[in-house]
Amino acid sequence: MSDGSSTTSRNQTSLVRSRASLQCDARLVNLLRPASYEAEQYRCLRQALLRKLTGGKCNVIAVSSPSPGSGKSTTAINLAAALIEPGIFRVLLIDADLRMPAVAKQLALDPVIDDGLDTALADWSLPLRDFVRYVPHPDGLTVLPTAARPEVAGRLVSSPRFGLLMLEARQQYDFVIINTPALVPTADCRAMAPWIDGFVVVVTAHRTTREVLEEGLNLMRPEQMLGLVFSDAERPSAPNKSWFRVRS
């Protein structure tokens, strides 16, 4: 009995050290502080999405926002981490915001140079697996980051190659989470939409106006709208912290 307790204790210590060794953005609570209140909100988001999505097939979920600066990249990373279940769900996180990429920086990955989504979209000869990276997370996190390519972003994400990569991802993963550009300023999300099952839209409390939100939602097909995530909403017991609510 004591041997089992020692093994469990060593495993828990190893997980704590593994999480402590991550040098990623402090807002990535599902990677760094999975027992926190904030991480639990992402698990609530996970459960809400699982109830709405079709089981038995890969689901491609885009995380966007009406305008930049709403925390969509943070939400996409935390949602991807919340969805991981070793042996059950294989999850791929893709940064498809070629205008203002943030995933690699937030995860403290090496700079993306000729080995990200931008290169995969331009080079049809290499398979998806040649571009994915693995984050040293206890449960494992697979990421396809990108370099900033604002001058050709629209052309790359609207090319047939994007659709082929999504088909390849569907064959290899159970969930694909895509961090997209903001909805209103560009047409990138509309170009990606045929390859996406649904959108989660991140709204910043007290900052995103109703007019901008309505404009963004009007650019989407209603059947693709999975729900809204409210970031920086006041949490009664800790008013200086961010938390999240899901509204479908």
Image (cartoon, helix red, strand yellow):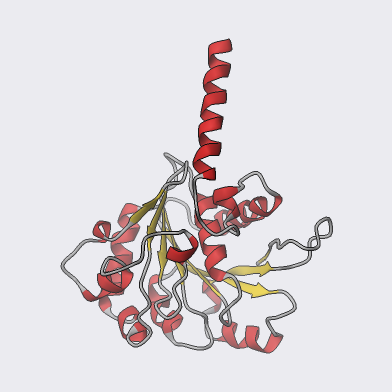
Who is closer to the viewer here, 73 or 43? 73
Q: Position of residue 20 (x, y in %)?
A: 54, 44
Q: Is residue 123 left or right of residue 206?
A: left
Can residue 43 be seen? yes
Count of numbered tags: 0
Looking at the rendering, in which quadrant would you find the N terminus? top right
Q: Is residue 206 above or below residue 136?
A: below
Which residue is located at x 59 percent, y 77 percent? 69
Q: Residue furthest top?
A: 1
Residue, x 52% and y 63% (percent of image)? Answer: 76
Q: Nearer the viewer, residue 169 or 147?
A: 147
Position in image of residue 179 (x %, y %): 47, 69
Image quadrant occupied by the C terminus = bottom right
Query: Is residue 1 visible from the viewing direction of this image?
Result: no
Residue 18 percent across, percent down from the top left: 49, 40
Rendered location of residue 48, percent (x, y): 62, 57
The residue lying furthest to the right in this view is: 236
